[in-house]
Amino acid sequence: MGGCLSGDVQGGKQAIGGVHQRPTSSSIANNAAHNDAVDFFFRSRGQYPLFSQIELTLSALNLLDCDITSKSDPVAVMYLRKKDGRLEEIGRTEVILNSLNPKWIEKITVSFQFEAVQTLVFHIYDVDTRYHNVPVKTLKLKDQDFLGEATCVLSEIMTRPNRTVTLTLTGNVRAGVNRNLGTLSVQAEETVASKTVAEINFRCVNLDNKDLFSKSDPFLRISRIVETSAAVPICRTEVVDNNLNPMWRPVCLTMQQFGSKDTPLVIECFDFNTSGNHELIGKTEKSVAELERLCLQKEAANFVYPSLRGNKVLKGQLIVDRYMEKVQYSFLDYISSGFELNFMVAVDFTASNGDPRTPSSLHYIDPSGRLNSYQQAIMEVGEVIQFYDSDKRFPAWGFGGRTSDGSVSHAFNLNGASYGDEVVGVEGIMAAYASALRNVALAGPTLFSHVVDKAAHTASQSLSQNSPKYFVLLIITDGVLTDMAGTVDALVRASDLPLSVLIIGVGNTDFKQMEMLDADNGRRLESSTGRIATRDIVQFVPMKDIHSGQVSVVQALLEELPGQFLSYVRSRKINPVGAPAI
């Protein structure tokens, strides 16, 4: 979803769960959540783990209230406890404002491995109001108030008849407070392998006014009725302010969310209140098939309001202006159809890496054969990109080095050739890199814009030929960037093209500049002329995280690539090779 709150900066008014679905199941790199690209990589090597993809729905009751003038704003974070006791983060819910009994809509996906004991740890936090504008992915949990934790084994949930467990929250919280921290309920469902998506435009007319000095601020919450007759929230629309005849942006529901077209859905219309006590305007129960019929027959469904005497039929009505089913192809659909990924490599030859003749340099070639930081990155990253590159021929460049003619170049051919920049395989990159170190002097400044523009030119040429290709520029750098503004401008220009930029950070430099380029704060890059990037095309991976065991190299490299790839092809309505139109 990208947003932290089940709302926007105005206080919880953003849609959640029903916008166009994320291409991958988790936005946080981990080995327990599913990622098509990672799964494909391992399966192609004959590694077929026995698992099912599981979606977890979380809700809580009677949470601790840490706020003085309002209620807590809870978020749930799920971890997997590793064999060595470390906690690996799997996913986070959205933040729900002013609620001690939250029902989170954002699901957390985990791979249920039948042969393994998977201990799940849940932490609940109250998000401070200072961080309500911060995307959930980038929230620093240490800055939030801890509300409690709970632990269970995934198989414990899966073996329950209704696949639901209720856990008592425990933990050390503020001294002197009531130690009853409430409960957390976890419900599990296997994911449905379906590409069907229903896109629905809702509007309402003649809603009851719940406000005294203005009109209601309505939003819809859609829940699915499960086997236990409980209603599990699957999405909510954005809030439309001060309007009794609201029209919402399209809701996009997958079959995973609604189950089948005949599954009953509860559609509730609420008047939004900043206190979190949203007031029910009315509700109706319709399946997706019935919603489709309403649209085709141009009919409306009256809301009802539950009371002790039964349901009171209201004059307020729900209207389906548009209903459309479509196929949403996956990353693997494109790759298996013959859509090609082409990688390009750029290596940092600036002086900030240190004199290659000294052992402290990141470019030092050890006579004993021990690989330096760049060689390690090339070898480890190369295995992954070589697998995904169809012809295994890589354009390879260096930047920031003084070449044989005495000039500093910011995009020279790594193989030293005047014409032809391609090398073959990882071995070719390693050989060209070693040769360049003997013939190119480290210099500067550190400019990314030249290699980004060069990669963008290649992608643009391919686009003009309607080739089914997507390009990935791999930049290996120590992270000390000179042309931040120029780089941002180049990346914004390239955001329209079939191109992603993967930045690999080597050494222990402060990588704040690289993290800014990654745009994981939820805000797309903005150029010096005020143009906003069409989409996020940058991913930054520090090699120190890989070497410390925090994440595998495969998981780190492929975390965001499927999503970036799909954001491009879907925005352009490009189908897999030979596939029928979406």
Image (cartoon, rainbow, N blue to C red):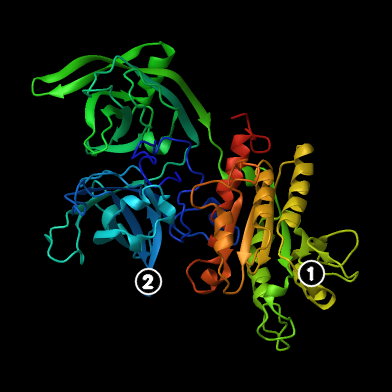
**Drawn side of residue 289 relative to residue 232, left or right:** right
Tell me, for residue 52, which label it has, or none.
none
Mark 2–mark 1 Cα distance, whole angstroms, equals: 42 Å
Query: In front: 467, or 191?
Result: 467
Residue 275 placement: quadrant: top left
Query: In front: 52, or 538?
Result: 538
Q: Few, some or many C-alpha atoms within 10 Å of disc 1 (few <14, some 14-19, many ≥20)?
A: many
**Which numbered disc, 2 or 1, marks the residue that appears first in the sequence?**
2
**CB-based contact (under 8 Å), mark 2 and mark 1:** no
Q: Position of residue 563 (x, y in %)?
A: 55, 47
Secondary structure state at the residue bearing disc 2? loop
In the displayed structure, would residue 38 be above or below residue 83? Answer: above
Q: How many marks?
A: 2
Quadrant assignment for the N terminus: top left
**Mark 1 highlights which residue?**
401
**Mark 2 highlights which residue?**
86
**Drawn side of residue 210 relative to residue 578, left or right:** left
Q: Residue at x 32, y 61 (%)?
A: 120
Residue 299 placement: quadrant: top left
Secondary structure state at the residue bearing disc 1? strand
Q: Position of residue 335 (x, y in %)?
A: 64, 47
Q: Residue at x 21, y 65 (%)?
A: 171
Q: Position of residue 184 (x, y in %)?
A: 22, 52
Asked whether residue 374 appears in the rendered view, the answer is yes
**Circle 2: residue type:** Arg
**Drawn side of residue 145 relative to residue 174, left or right:** right
Q: Residue at x 16, y 50 (%)?
A: 62
Q: Residue at x 67, y 77 (%)?
A: 362
Q: Position of residue 340 (x, y in %)?
A: 70, 48
Asked whether residue 293 appears in the rendered view, the answer is no
**Circle 1: residue type:** Gly
In the displayed structure, would residue 494 be above or below residue 249? Answer: below
